[in-house]
Image: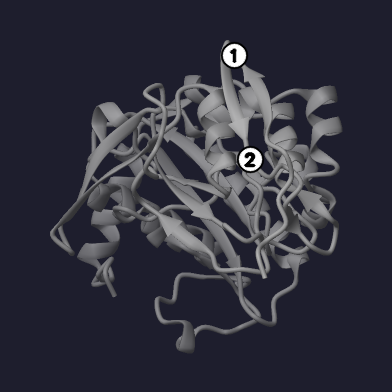
Amino acid sequence: MPKATSPATEIEVGGRTVRLSNPDRVYFPELGLTKFDLARYYLSVGDGIVSALRERPCMMHRFPDGLAGERVHQKRLPRGAPDWMETVHVTFPRWNRTADELCVTELAQVIWSVQMSCVEFHPWNSRRGHVEQPDEWRIDLDPGDDCDFAAVRRVAGVAHEVLDELGAVGWPKTTGSKGLHVYVRIAPEHGFTDVRRAALAFAREVGRRTDEATTTWWRKDRDPRQVFVDFNQNARDHTIAAAYSVRATPDARVSAPLRWDEVADCDPGEHTVLTMPARYAELGDVHTGIDDAVFDLAPLLEWAERDEAAGHTVPDAED
């Protein structure tokens, strides 16, 4: 039986016209949210999502049949893109492959991606001008199976204390799932290996200060009541959902940027496609200023050398 279709609509975005086919196709069955609803959401947080994605290689998580269908992890820009869509050429040495990935510089490119059934945007932590040198250190607080979100919030508080002592500015957000992310801007002067070493040294310090956090590498060896401070999200070609990205959850959650004074009481379920537009209209992008707060990784690399000299090994990023 052929799929039902609805007449296409056109959306004007920054002087460009984006054609949205089948705008009434349902993407989130439990809420009845459609492709048009998804496009309208991204328009409502336009400056925020563009800032989060700007100049970064970006993997598209596409759902051609909505959440009820298959998820497609798209590294290459889909065929048929207009000439104003931008890309960045990246290599994947492990598989001896290359790809021209989406590289957002304006909001129309986000909306065209929605036309191509993209729900989630997962950017690299480096940018087009220096793909091999990250400018974003990512702190990923990933709760174990028996760990509640209150513990995640408490570990985030410890991470905040360590960042303050380092003189680093962290920018927290919900993952849109069960955890929290914190971003720190860094100068693009180090490769992925060193950024990951620095991230591990930081994670170990957090683990020293609270028994609710762990850096234990293998999941089978972790206490499921602990929060894994996932330093490996800083490995090359690892991506996480961007700030303001919608997540493929039944309640249409989004990865919501927060102020630090909100973290202690935040509830990831409160931030969805339905609620974020009003928050954004009231507060704007609460991560404004992130690009101006650049941290020098030198102290963390010294911590890494100290730990390694003491016999603490760095797990292989490809394990």
**Where is residue 309, by image quadrant?**
bottom left
Q: Tell me, for residue 74, which label it has, or none.
A: none
- Measuring 52% from the left and 41% from the top, which residue is drawn there? 183
Q: In front: 149, or 116?
A: 116
- Measuring 34% from the left and 47% from the top, which residue is drawn there? 76
Pointer 1 residue: 14
**Is 109 on the left-hand or right-hand side of 127?**
right
| Residue 262 vertical placement versus 52 (above, below) | below
Closer to viewer: mark 1 or mark 2: 2
- Residue 135 horizontal/vertical position (percent): 36, 34
Q: Amino acid at mark 1?
A: Gly
Pointer 2 residue: 21
- Residue 209 horizontal/vertical position (percent): 57, 62
Crowd rating for badge 2 (residues with CA inside 10 Å; few <14, some 14–19, many 20+)? some
| Residue 33 vertical placement versus 144 (above, below) | above
**Is 12 on the left-hand or right-hand side of 261?**
left
